[in-house]
Image: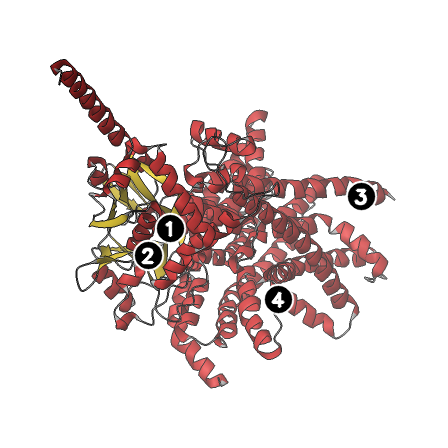
Amino acid sequence: MTPIEIAHILVVWTPFLAGGFVWNILISLVAMVIGTVLGAALARLRLARRKSIARASLVVTELTRNIPTFVFLFYLAFLIPAEFEVSGQIYLFPAWLKAALALSVAVVGFVSDNLFVAWQHWRSDNHLAALLFIPSWTMYLLIIVMASSTASVIGVGEIVSRCNVVIAAVGGDEMMIWVYAYAISYFFGFCFPLNWAMGRVKQRLLARVSTTPLQPVERSTEERLEINGRNLP
Amino acid sequence: MNSRLLLRTAWWLALLVILGSREALADRFDLIQKRGTLIVGVKSDYPPFGMLDANGQLIGFEPDLAAELAYRLGVQAQLVAVSSTNRLQKLEEGAIDVVIATLGDTPQRRQIATLIEPNYYASGVTVVAPPNARLSSWADLRGKKVCAIQGAYFNRSMAQRFLLDLQIFNGTRDAKLALRDGRCVAWLYDDTGIVGALSDPEWANYETPLPATMISPWAMAIAASERGLRLERTIADVIADWHHSGWLIRTEQRWGIHPSRFLAEMRELWTRASPVGGMVCARLPTGEWPAECRNKSLLTSTDVSGLQHVGLLIKERTGLNLTILYDAYDRDLFLHGLSMTLRLMVGSIAGSLILGCLGALTAERVPFLGGLARLLAALGRMTPPLLLIYLVFFGVGHIVVTRYGWTFDGSVIAIFCLSLYTGCAVLFALLEACAVLKNQNPGFALGGRSLARALRLAYAPVIASLVNVVKATGMASAIAVPELISASTAIVAEQGNAAVMMNVLMITYFLLVMGVVQFFNYLERRMRPHDAD
């Protein structure tokens, strides 16, 4: 196969693959929304006056941190029926929504930890430091977009499973490497610029935060934010 | 002749006849011997298992079994066509002696007839796919559109066990057309029915690429009243001998049936020698077959002992089907999966650390490669690990195989790819630590000794990355590495116990992740005194 033939095949299938990538973004956004709502609730509870509530919320956060999303994906795929009946009406529970739910577990832990810190900053009138949550959240969205590729294992028609469709349709074993590499370029092309931009925003914010004197305690929470931000799905 | 004597003789004769007929009624075996024929119900519409030839004679795999069975009993066989709906009814009426008509062995049927063990054949579910469909395992069909026929008993279970997107059609013809037009990637069908359904030359190049699943053993049946009597025992011994001698496999071959795995396994089982002498499958003093030679799905806790008893008792009392507790095969599968997952975890942790440290040393020490290493690491962090696994396993793997003939183990590739992804995160954490150390001491340079200092400073983010890679090891299942997820989905596929197995899988994984976290916490505590100096 000549490079021109390979490029031609990739161009022909681009709309199909790009359509798959839209699904990746959609699944990720849904996961982020669900995870942010639940995570925010947990973060709020961690600030509760009553120690027992704060502790319980922390335990739940710890729990979500230790759940492997890839395994959870299978768990939901097998245990939530594809369709269910409520008072005579049949509702579908599509596989992409199961994938979004599985991914949202990781988001819950992330948001609970980071929003908790941001909230504390906000309360102590350290508004700039609190705003750090926004670039962190966006960078985490990118991590979820990458993780959304795992939805292919339960048959969601996102970009990775569409790669397999293309390979089966084109039939050439030589094409495999190019189709997968092409799909990787989508993730890189989407994630790299956004990640870089958010990195810059974060640096600027941090630079402005450090001009205002920080309490030593807050330094350590700052470090913790950095650690928890790495809690990947 | 004395009339009284005559009366008495007549009375005795009458009694004898009554008793004699009682005897005949009670034991069908004698009736068959007396009448000299064995009346067998077989199918007439299920080629090649039971069908009509050009002369209207019943022929096929099952009629051959009927003839051989009659021969063994020393009588003639008389074949009667039966259907799926009337076969057990005719048996109950006494119109036929034996049913050999594709009858699946189920607990419900055991209530209304005597089903004879050992089972003589088994059907399973498989798919018909167009040529070059690239299906190598059932997992390849997850979420895919698969054609099926309305009312097939396996539709629902198959959809649940393999996550298929079933397209239900009214009849065989519609499903075949849909498959031909590409409206589904495969057609779900009973593997014993396929020969008949695909007899048309147009379908000659269609394939059945997947091993049959949901194996349902077939049993010969006799009337419920014959349970434990001579007929049951005699037929059972004949079938046992067929498995032992391989006669069933030869008969299957003669009818051009695709070799069934069930018959091969039964042959192995019924010829296996016991370590204490004799055969494994020999009748116990009670007259029963040993538990391991019986249909496993129909055993109850009273049939077995030990761990198997406990597992079955839990199933009967609570409905929790913990096959990994009582089924030796499933238990092995799960334990192997567990050990593979542990190896993947240890391998990925070690691989990530090694690649991360090597990358950081390259980036810091080698003048020209530094920028390149950083760029590659950034690329590595932006590549979804699952795609990387596919790229290396299928894409690169294909090139390496065709050019050099080398093949790589899937688990090695999974460890490599996961380590590469996580190694990039470790690398960046180390570089950040280096920046801090350089800030404190401008003369700092990363090297063998100072690497330990950088690692200690970057401990928390490095550990977070390592915990993440442990959580991601399940991705190896995507390329069929036999780890925990693969083992669990395989067990669900065979047993249909999705709820139990998925909870077992989730809890096991959760505990493994917890264990890794605890281990690193312990290490951190051990390292702390060093930090002080």
Q: Residue furthest right?
A: B533
Q: Would residue B185 appear left or right of B502 to someone viewing this image? A: left
Marked residue chain, label 4: B
Q: Is the C-beta separation of discs 4 and 3 under 8 Å? A: no
CA–CA distance between discs 1 and 4? 38 Å
Above or below: residue B431 compared with residue A182: above
Callouts 2 and 3 close, C-beta under 8 Å: no
Instruction: Report the residue marked by disc 3.
Output: B527
Check disc 4 and report the residue beneath it.
Answer: B408
User: What x and y, as percent, mark residue B219?
Assistant: 34, 44
Q: Is residue B405 visible in the rendered structure shown here? A: yes
Residue B468: x %, y % from top left: 61, 50
- The residue at 68%/72% (across/down) is B372
Circle 2 marks a residue in which chain? B
**Residue mark closest to the camera, 2 vs 4:** 2
In 3D space, how far apart are the residues under numbered discs 3 and 1 (Cα atoms)?
63 Å
Determine which residue is flagged by label 2.
B192
